[in-house]
Image (spheres, helix red, strand yellow):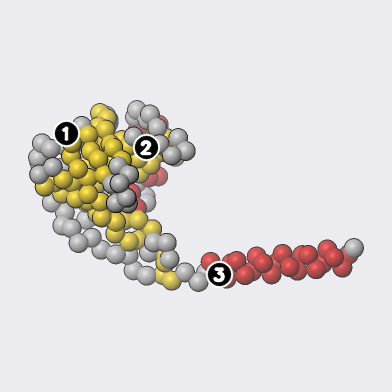
Amino acid sequence: MFKICIIMKTKSITVVLIIISMCSCLRTLPDEVFSMMRIPYNGKEIRLDGCYVSDKVFNKRCEYNFFYSDGVLFVFSDLVNIENISQFTGGIDDMRKYKSCWGLFQVENNIIKAQRWKSSDDAVQSIVQNRTYKIINDTTLSIDILNDGDINYYHFKKFTPKPDSTNVFIK
C-alpha cells in the first residue's frame, strides 16, 4: 500500500511539472501598436454623457463601452444593471489598470471605427483588435464582432459621474 502511495505521488508530481513547463513555453512578444491616430471627437452622432451597454448577457455580465471626447474608448464587462461607479465589481480603479480595457475610436458618418488591445492566445502580448460599430441612432449601436452574422446591440445609458479617460496606456 505504501509503495502505491509513493508511485501515485510521484506520478502526480510529474504531471504537475509537465503542466508547469508547458505553460512556461509561451513566447513573450512586444505589444502591438495602434495604427489609428488619436483624434478628438466633437460630433453629434453618439452621446458622450454615459456609456453604451450590450444587450447580450453572458453569466450575468454585459459589456460597457465609454466613448470620450478625446478619442479614447474604455471597454470592459461587468454585472448587468450597474447604475453608478461604486457598483462596478472590484471598483472602477481596478478596471483602469488593464491595458485590454483601453482603445481609440473615430467616427465617420454612421460608423465608429475602434481599436483596442486584447490578450493574445499564443503569446504573452497585447494584440490590436479592430472593431466597427454601426450607429443606428445616437442611443443605439450595433456590431458583428466575429463577422458571423451574430449582431450585438448596445444601448446608451446615462451615467453620472462617468469615469475619466486618463490612463497610462494611451498618451
Residue 99 appearing in the image: no
* Label 2 Cα neighbours within 10 Å, binned few <14 / some 14-19 / many ≥20: some
Taking depth in this image into account, of 114 and 149 the one nearest to the observer is 149
Question: Dot 3 corresponds to which residue?
Answer: 22
Quadrant the C terminus occupies: bottom left
**Can you tell which quarter of the image residue 51 is in?**
top left
Q: CA distance from mark 1 to mark 3?
A: 48 Å
What is the three-letter code of the residue carrying label 2? Lys
What is the three-letter code of the residue carrying label 3? Met
What is the three-letter code of the residue carrying label 1? Asn
**What kind of element bears circle 1?**
strand
Q: CA distance from mark 2 to mark 1?
A: 19 Å
Taking depth in this image into account, of 126 and 63 the one nearest to the observer is 63
In the image, residue 135 above or below residue 20: above
Taking depth in this image into account, of 57 and 78 the one nearest to the observer is 57
**What kind of element bears circle 3?**
helix
Query: For the residues carrying marks 1 and 3, which lies nearer the camera in this image?
Result: 1
Residue at image position (35%, 44%) is 76
Q: CA distance from mark 2 to mark 3?
A: 35 Å
In the image, residue 4 above or below residue 40: below
Question: Dot 1 corresponds to which residue?
Answer: 137
* Label 1 Cα neighbours within 10 Å, binned few <14 / some 14-19 / many ≥20: some
Which residue of the protein is positioned furthest toward the right in this rendering? Answer: 1
Residue 79 appearing in the image: yes
Question: Dot 2 corresponds to which residue?
Answer: 56
- Closer to the N terminus: mark 1 or mark 3? 3
Residue at image position (82%, 67%) is 6
**Residue 147 location in percent, x, y?**
29, 51
